Image: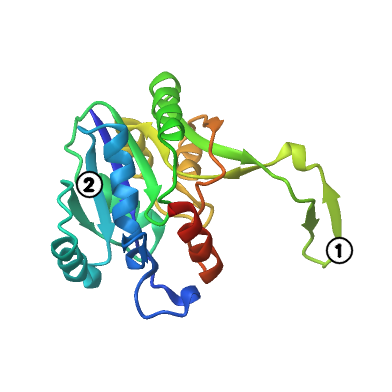
């Protein structure tokens, strides 16, 4: 069985907008709908779990009615942290379920079908996979005393989502107590002792968090 947990807990603060960023429209409908549709296009039988703050769930249901959005999905309550939100989404997967689960940012609507396929195929083979892209800019490492030095960008990758894992392994990893080192779902799995495989992402798989990103999204959707 394949699942995708789509985490959408944004408040839209960097957008300078009262509407949370995942609900902002591109191409005539909310970003979040485009994201869900991308995974349903990958696999019409995939089980979609949407993680939303409780205060936003009624608004989402209203948007679904307005846009006649009928892709089947369950809703889990968002937590105070990404760790809590992912854990709440995982709780909707029945105990003992065998298969794969991806976790994806709700505001990444342009992940390609090829990227999704690579992630699930690699996770099927290795247990854990995430998409990455090369770093094009020069990088400098900054020390606590303020000094800095150039580092080899060839040794670094930019991480995207979906991050895809064996369901039972991820549930065991999320039984760990939270710590500040958990920056994403892969870091939770690494802390549990699981090796993470990397696959090629896609350049359009941007995370829409600013007005500039929104302009790029409108160009991409067009």
Residue at mark 2 to residue at mark 1: CA–CA distance:
44 Å
Residue 39 or residue 156, whichever sits in front: 39
Image quadrant of residue 9? bottom left
Q: Quadrant of the N terminus?
A: top left
Residue 27 or residue 56, whichever sits in front: 27
Task: Name above or below for residue 175 compared with residue 45.
Answer: below
Tell me where residue 118 appears, x and y as whole percent: 45, 27
Q: Secondary structure at mark 2?
A: loop
Tell me where residue 122 appears, x and y as whole percent: 45, 24
In the visual, does 166 lie left or right of 158? left
Q: How many marks?
A: 2
Tell me where residue 77 appears, x and y as whole percent: 23, 60
Q: Residue furthest front?
A: 222
Task: Name above or below for residue 72 compared with residue 63.
Answer: above
Q: Which residue is mark 1?
A: 147
Tell me where residue 75 appears, x and y as whole percent: 19, 55
Q: Residue at x 21, y 65 (%)?
A: 60
Dot 2 and dot 1 residues touching (CB under 8 Å): no
In the visual, does 128 lie left or right of 59? right
Q: Secondary structure at mark 1?
A: loop
Task: Name above or below for residue 207 compared with residue 91.
Answer: below
Q: Which residue is mark 2?
A: 91
Label 2: few (<14), some or many (≥20) within 10 Å?
few
Residue 168 or residue 219, whichever sits in front: 219
Label 1: few (<14), some or many (≥20) within 10 Å?
few
Q: Residue at x 42, y 26 (%)?
A: 123
Q: Residue at x 32, y 57 (%)?
A: 32
Q: Earlier in the sequence, mark 2 or mark 1?
A: 2
């Amino acid at each position: 069985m394949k699942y995708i947990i789509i985490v959408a807990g944004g408040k839209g603060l960097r957008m300078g907008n009262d509407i949370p960023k995942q609900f902002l429209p591109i191409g005539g409908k909310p970003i979040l709908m485009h994201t869900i549709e991308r995974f349903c296009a990958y696999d019409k039988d995939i089980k979609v779990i949407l993680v939303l703050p409780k205060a936003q769930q009624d608004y989402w249901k209203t948007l679904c009615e307005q846009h006649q959005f009928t892709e089947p999905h369950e809703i889990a309550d968002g937590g105070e942290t990404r760790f809590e939100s992912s854990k709440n989404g995982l709780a909707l997967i029945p105990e003992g379920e065998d298969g794969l689960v991806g976790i994806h940012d709700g505001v990444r609507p342009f992940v390609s079908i090829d990227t999704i396929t690579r992630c699930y195929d690699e996770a099927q083979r290795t247990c854990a996979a995430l998409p990455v892209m090369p770093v094009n800019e020069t990088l400098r490492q900054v020390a606590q005393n303020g000094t800095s030095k150039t580092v080899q960008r060839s040794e670094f990758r930019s991480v995207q989502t979906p991050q895809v894992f064996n369901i039972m392994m991820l549930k065991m990893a999320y039984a760990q107590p939270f710590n500040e080192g958990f920056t994403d779902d892969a870091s939770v799995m690494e802390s549990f002792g699981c090796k993470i495989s990397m696959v090629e992402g896609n350049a359009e798989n941007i995370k829409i968090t600013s007005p500039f990103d929104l302009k790029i999204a409108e160009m991409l959707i067009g």
